[in-house]
Amino acid sequence: MLNCVAMTSQTHDSARAERARRSEYSHFEHKLRDRWCQLRDEAREALTRSENEAYAEIAGRVSDLEDQSLADLLVDVNLAEVTRDVQEIRAVEHALRRIALGTYGICVSCGQPIERERLEAYPIANRCAACQRAYEHGHASRPTPRL
């Protein structure tokens, strides 16, 4: 009988902890959904701006190589903005999936909780600060050789 009582108590404690965790992460879910909407709007604006400043139109107005370089740069900047926004949208969607699965706030590398301060500053974080430093150190790109 004692084991049954202990098991029931553990089950209730687990359920209580799960409800508390879900409640705590609803703040992050709202924050992530707001960011997703903001990114979607930014990407949409950049694409609209890109359509309005079509490369062929910009290139048709250039009169020398310097103008051509500027036209190329403007197109590249627009594309880079959209690419950055799409990458962050994917990261936000991944974080929302982790919330739904109950794994949000758990480091994918060590399995320990991610610091709340880190999640507040960077809600899409999937590693604790220590594991992120180790990851960046191990995956740092080498400088490109120059002439």
Image (cartoon, rainbow, N blue to C red):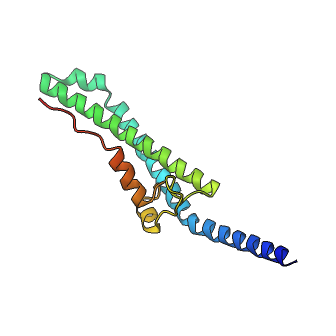
Look at 29% across and 32% down and name the residue there: 76
Question: Above or below — where is 11 with respect to 91?
Answer: below
- Residue 8: % across, % down: 80, 73
Question: Above or below — where is 75 with respect to 2?
Answer: above
- Locate residue 63 relative to residue 98 in the image: left or right: left
| Occupied quadrant, residue 49 | top left
| Occupied quadrant, residue 26 | bottom right
- Residue 20: % across, % down: 63, 71
Look at 40% across and 42% down and name the residue there: 45
Question: Above or below — where is 123 with respect to 78?
Answer: below
Q: Quadrant of the C terminus?
A: top left
- Residue 91: % across, % down: 48, 47
Look at 50% across and 56% down and name the residue there: 110
- Residue 55: % across, % down: 30, 25
- Locate residue 128 relative to residue 144 in the image: left or right: right
Question: Above or below — where is 68 with respect to 17?
Answer: above
Look at 40% across and 63% down and name the residue there: 121
- Locate residue 102 relative to residue 106 in the image: left or right: right
**Which of the two residues, 48 or 106, is positioned nearer the viewer here?**
106
